Image (tube, coloured by chain):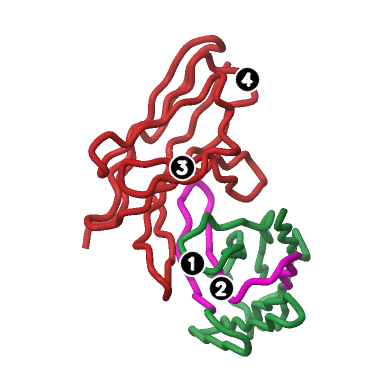
Amino acid sequence: ELKVEQNPLFLSMQEGKNYTIYCNYSTTSDRLYWYRQDPGKSLESLFVLLSNGAVKQEGRLMASLDTKARLSTLHITAAVHDLSATYFCAVDPRSGNTPLVFGKGTRLSVIA
Amino acid sequence: EAGVAQSPRYKIIEKRQSVAFWCNPISGHATLYWYQQILGQGPKLLIQFQNNGVVDDSQLPKDRFSAERLKGVDSTLKIQPAKLEDSAVYLCASSQPGQGNTEAFFGQGTRLTVV
């Protein structure tokens, strides 16, 4: 059974600082997704990583995937308050049209 | 492009009552998922449909939960009878099957409170 672990689960960071969220998973996969969820809202897709070494960047967020290490990172650069949300990584366990397995999420709070 | 539509947005019921949720996926998406998200946790799959057939319902509590997608488009999820631990957000998602990007798109969810 695929396990997806995120850390940290809670993160409070100051505006302007950098930080990285980690997502480890237990079985081979080359498809990983990052989602953002605001309180009371649904999941918004951030990044789709489909191969080893994939790197995607959007604004202050950058995601990468290392399939050999079974690790993805979400790096936050110069955090701003608007980034406060819960971030989930999700892994496709059989690499194609199979249900995503989600981590528990990282609740990020950016403070002034 | 319209997104995944769900209704109702909120529902409060007493334990042992029944409830139903509705989902309309993105047009053309053959795959439909129902996920349960308990407060403070990540979404957990309940059931996956491909067109009108069930692909994976291994985590669906079949003694009380049922789901159908009769015409391969809309889907309903039913709980009967509800328990307190069923309080959660029920998310519907859809995707287009294939070998490339099979990203799932989520609806806004139905927040269920069982009292």
Which residue is identified by label 1? Answer: A96
Q: How many marks?
A: 4
Mark 1 to mark 4 CA distance (whole Å): 35 Å
Which residue is identified by label 3? Answer: B34
> Which amino acid type is marked by label 2?
Arg
> Which amino acid type is marked by label 3?
Trp
Q: Which mark is residue B84?
A: 4
Residue A90 x, y percent position in the rendering: 59, 63
Dot in front, 3 or 4: 3
Residue contact between numbered discs 2 and 1, judged by CB atoms under 8 Å: yes
Q: Name the one closer to the observer, A104 or A14.
A: A104
Residue A7 x, y percent position in the rendering: 77, 65
Mark 2 to mark 1 CA distance (whole Å): 8 Å
Q: Say which quadrant the C terminus of chain A sits in.
A: bottom right
Q: Write down which chain is painted green.
A: A
Report the predominant secondary structure element of the magenta stretch: strand
Per the rendered image, the range of residues in magenta is A22-49
Q: Find numbered disc 1 in the image and state the secondary structure of the residue it sits on.
A: loop
Mark 1 closeness class: few <14, some 14–19, many ≥20 residues within 10 Å: some
Residue A108 in magenta stretch: no
Q: Write down which chain is painted red.
A: B
Is B4 left or right of B84, judged from the image as shown? Answer: left
